Image (cartoon, rainbow, N blue to C red):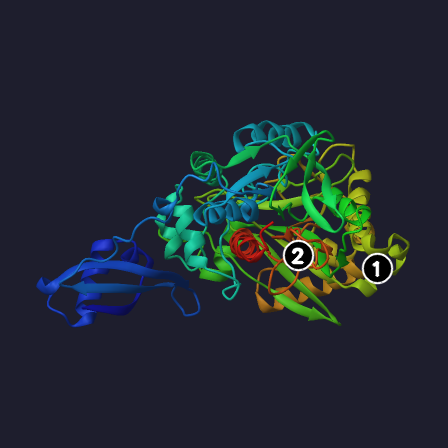
Amino acid sequence: MRKVVELKLKPALAADLEEVRRRAIRQSGWPESTVTDWQLLRRSIDARGSQVVIRLRVELARDEQLGGEARIIDGFRDVSERPEIIIIGAGPAGYFAALELIELGLRPIIFDRGKDVRSRRRDLRAIQQFGEVNPHSNYCFGEGGAGTYSDGKLYTRSHKRGNIAKALQLLVEHGAKSDILIDAHPHIGSNKLPQVVANIRETILHYGGQIHFDALVTDFVMDGNQIKGVIVNNSEEHLGESVVLATGHSARDIFYLLHRRGIRIEAKPFALGVRVEHPQHLIDRIQYRQSPREEHLPASSYRLACQVGDRGVFSFCMCPGGLVVPASTAPGELVVNGMSMSRRDSAYANSGTVVAVELEDLHAFEAHGIFAGLEFQRSVEQSMFQRGDGSQRAPAARMTDFVAGRLSQDLPNTSYIPGVYTAPMHQLLPPNIFQRLRRGMETFGKKMRGYFTEEANVIGTESRTSSPIRIPRQKDTLMHEDATGLFPCGEGAGYAGGIISAAMDGQNVARAIALYLSNRPRT
């Protein structure tokens, strides 16, 4: 017999698992001697009242044990001799597609332009310390994708898109803490996620898959409108039964390749703005009404959104206790992103703060046709870079000066290792973006008292929130609408927005491929 109870505890009590067990049993009404097992099902922070509390959902059992379910990967079998599926990209969409393919008895062959997670670190150091951008190995490109070294947040609202629990369970089976299965806003951290990613790689290889790094896909092998395989590094041909395109939102060359090959792509809305960095103690004071926060509370976060005219302004990828990092993918551009380590113990909190960009906002770039949004992104990134000294130092302003449209005389301290310098952000951003951002920040300051402050840095530019291109696919088969055998997948194709949603999309595509192959006429 089982029973689920709800608890509301102070943080220190919620951190004491024995106390949680005792209180759960007391609330259940069962005699303690009859309870044979228990487990936490859900944990969340509730800061709405006068005191911060932790809400817990606890399951109790009588006359049975909880858990004991078999691991997902224990059901995997060797696929070395099975039909081969090519996957372009070793991010969450590509890797989770590979795991699902193995479970379905198909062999994944993965090609990634970047390096494995360990080797990527040298290129991250080069961009942080020396401003040197490797266009194939950086914070966006390489094993694990953009999320590996930019936080590892696992929260998603895409509950209808797939099996969130399965994606999280696979992460746990590859080394993530089991806390991600119960936390309302699960997080691994950029210091822990690389090992999890490396463990996933080992699983794929162990069961017969292949993974090739420094392997840039430069063309497709086509027979009419059918994709037969890929050309790697301009020379190597690799054929497969299907091709999964899981390259992420920054692989601009892939969009141009598709267009050149006559494979239809579509322009779509995206977002662009800045990264806002506050002292973490200030956010804690606003959200928890305490600073310093008590020991058992994590660094606090926020999510903000408003309408300015007919466009949304919203926070994105909020990193409590985090760092701002350089996310450029080519020399001559300046892009920033955010990340947190597992303990989220930095003295800073940062979040992308962006404006929705619709297709009608791109008139000045209409000569670029379907690539208008991409070229708009690039123009802002290059403008930010050209204002500087040729390094990855980022232009910035105090929030109060940004909103007032003036140059800051000095800047608050920052977590951004390459450094920031005072710049006329109101002139560097496109006028419509700047005007909506300034009004949005004023509104956020009214919604969240203390947010609008001279202690916050506004840093440029946050431009890779999503892809300005969608690669259309059929709703039922998930195959490209007019390229047989091509399965667009994840953020770069326009069907995901984060680690878990990309992972679930990869799983969905893998199942679609298995169905496609099973229904395909035998020759």
Image quadrant where residue 21 sits: bottom left
Residue 395, image x, y percentages: 74, 43
Q: Residue furthest right?
A: 367
Q: Nearer the viewer, residue 294 or 520?
A: 520
Answer few, some or many: residues within 10 Å of disc 1's Cα (few below 14, many 20 plus, some between 14 and 19): some
Kindly identify the residue that appears in the image at 19 percent across and 64 percent down. 61
Using the numbered discs, state the Cα–Cα distance from disc 2 to disc 1 in whole angstroms.
Answer: 19 Å
Residue 84, can we see it? yes
Kindly identify the residue that appears in the image at 66 percent across and 32 percent down. 127
Q: Is residue 262 above or below residue 138?
A: below
| Left or right placement of residue 163 versus residue 379 in this view | left
Q: Nearer the viewer, residue 473 or 427?
A: 473
Q: Nearer the viewer, mark 2 or mark 1?
A: 2
Q: Which residue is mark 1?
A: 362
Numbered mark located on residue 26 in the image: none
Three-letter code for the amino acid on which mark 1 is drawn: Leu
Q: Nearer the viewer, residue 108 or 308?
A: 108
| Left or right placement of residue 123 versus residue 199 in this view | right
Q: Is residue 409 above or below residue 114?
A: below
| Left or right placement of residue 483 versus residue 349 in this view | right
Numbered mark located on residue 494 in the image: 2
Quadrant of the drawing holding the N terminus: bottom left
Residue 14, image x, y percentages: 29, 58
Residue 356, image x, y percentages: 72, 62
Q: Residue furthest front?
A: 523
